[in-house]
């Protein structure tokens, strides 16, 4: 049974005229993502002014970004350097499960972050009560749990299909749609169920996010303070930028009909939200945030004083 054999990850290095240069670029981006998100996590946990629900959620987002870029990129880079592009069925299943869990968790975390902004802007006097430490930890635990449900549902079914076609996965990691193309059995029913599952996984967060921002916009419209409106828009626009980038790529990958997909397009979109999004998130949440930039300057100043 082909399930027991290795797969071959074709990736996009084989399609590049300068694979060594592309490998270096991706390695630099990987290091930027790791360092940017790690610094953001360190700042949030070490600065007393950033010990709020919003920054707790941002630190969890950074943790998820670090984990899911680490699930795909190191393997891809090592394969290119070592000249090996095989992955065992068990490794493929683990990679698929971790990736699905992290992406699913991030969907729900973005919804939790939208709800947090709704409470902060629409119910500021009750914010400390409604978004206390216990509630925040419960919300984050729920996000991780729901993401793992996605992984536990899709991974075992995908990996138990008989693979009797080519062993070549036209992707740089084991993503469900790419692996499913290798199956020689009828997968139409499973693809329909996967579509419904993805609709549910996206519909719940999108409903929470849309509802939260509808109430936020109504509240901002009624604000008398121009400074208050500006601060609210700045905070929310950062989050909405991340939501649009992440959800847009997910809708293309898991919800558009197969006629819209080609291996090249699929890899390009996956590169965007697997490799580039983890780099962009810390920039989006730090460059436009005075609290984070202030904490970073303070940490750098303390470091320079210590050196002197």
Image (spheres, rainbow, N blue to C red):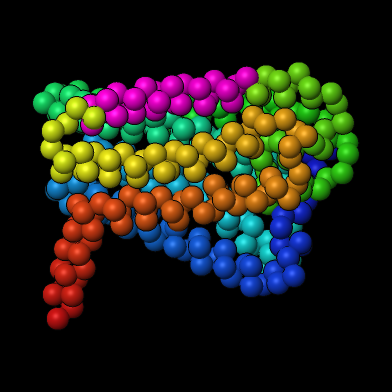
Magenta region includes residue 205 = yes
Left or right of 171 on screen, residue 127: left
Image coordinates of residue 209 in percent, x first then y, are 39, 27
Q: Residue at x 76, y 54 (%)?
A: 10
- Residue range of the region highlighted in magenta in the rendering: 196-220
Using the rendered image of the protein, determine whether residue 56 is visible from the camera's viewpoint. Answer: no
Tell me the quarter of the image containing the C terminus: bottom left
Residue at 19% across, 27% down: 222
Tell me where residue 263 appears, x and y as whole percent.
75, 46
Quadrant of the snapshot with the N terminus: top right
Picture quadrant of residue 37: bottom left
Predominant SS along the magenta part: helix
Residue at the (18%, 75%) spot, across then down? 304
Residue at left offset 51%, top offset 32%? 104
136 over 278 or under it: above or below? above
Name the residue nearer the viewer: 255 or 131. Answer: 255
Residue 213 in magenta stretch: yes
Q: Is residue 171 above or below residue 198?
A: below
Judged left or right of residue 94, residue 297 is left
Q: Is residue 184 visible?
A: yes
Choose top left, top right, bottom left or bottom right for residue 261. Answer: top right
Residue 4, image x and y in percent? 79, 39
Q: Position of residue 142 (x, y in %)?
A: 39, 25
């Amino acid at each position: 049974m082909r399930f027991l054999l290795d797969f071959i990850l074709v990736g996009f290095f084989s399609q590049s005229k300068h694979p060594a240069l592309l490998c270096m670029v991706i390695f630099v981006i990987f290091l930027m993502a790791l360092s940017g998100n790690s610094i953001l996590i360190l700042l949030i946990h070490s600065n007393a002014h950033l010990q709020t629900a919003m920054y707790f959620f941002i630190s969890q987002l950074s943790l998820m970004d670090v984990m899911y870029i680490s699930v795909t990129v190191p393997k891809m880079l090592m394969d290119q350097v070592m000249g090996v592009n095989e992955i065992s069925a068990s490794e493929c299943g683990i990679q698929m499960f971790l990736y699905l869990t992290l992406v699913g968790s991030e969907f729900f975390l973005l919804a939790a972050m939208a709800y947090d902004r709704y409470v902060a802007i629409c119910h500021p006097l009750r914010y400390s009560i409604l978004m206390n430490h216990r509630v925040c930890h419960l919300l984050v635990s729920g996000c991780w749990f729901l993401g793992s449900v996605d992984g536990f549902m899709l991974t075992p079914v995908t990996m138990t299909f008989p693979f009797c076609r080519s062993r070549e996965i036209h992707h740089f990691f084991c993503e469900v749609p790419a692996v499913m193309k290798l199956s020689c059995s009828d997968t139409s029913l499973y693809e329909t169920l996967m579509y419904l599952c993805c609709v549910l996984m996206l519909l719940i967060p999108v409903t929470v996010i849309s509802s939260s921002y509808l109430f936020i916009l109504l509240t901002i419209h009624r604000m008398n303070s121009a400074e208050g409106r500006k601060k609210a828009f700045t905070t929310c626009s950062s989050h909405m930028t991340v939501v649009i980038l992440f959800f847009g790529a997910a809708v293309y990958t898991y919800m558009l009909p197969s006629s819209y997909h080609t291996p090249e397009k699929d890899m390009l979109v996956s590169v965007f939200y697997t490799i580039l999004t983890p780099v962009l998130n810390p920039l989006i949440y730090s460059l436009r945030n005075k609290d984070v930039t202030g904490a970073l300057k303070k940490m750098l100043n303390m470091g320079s004083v210590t050196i002197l």
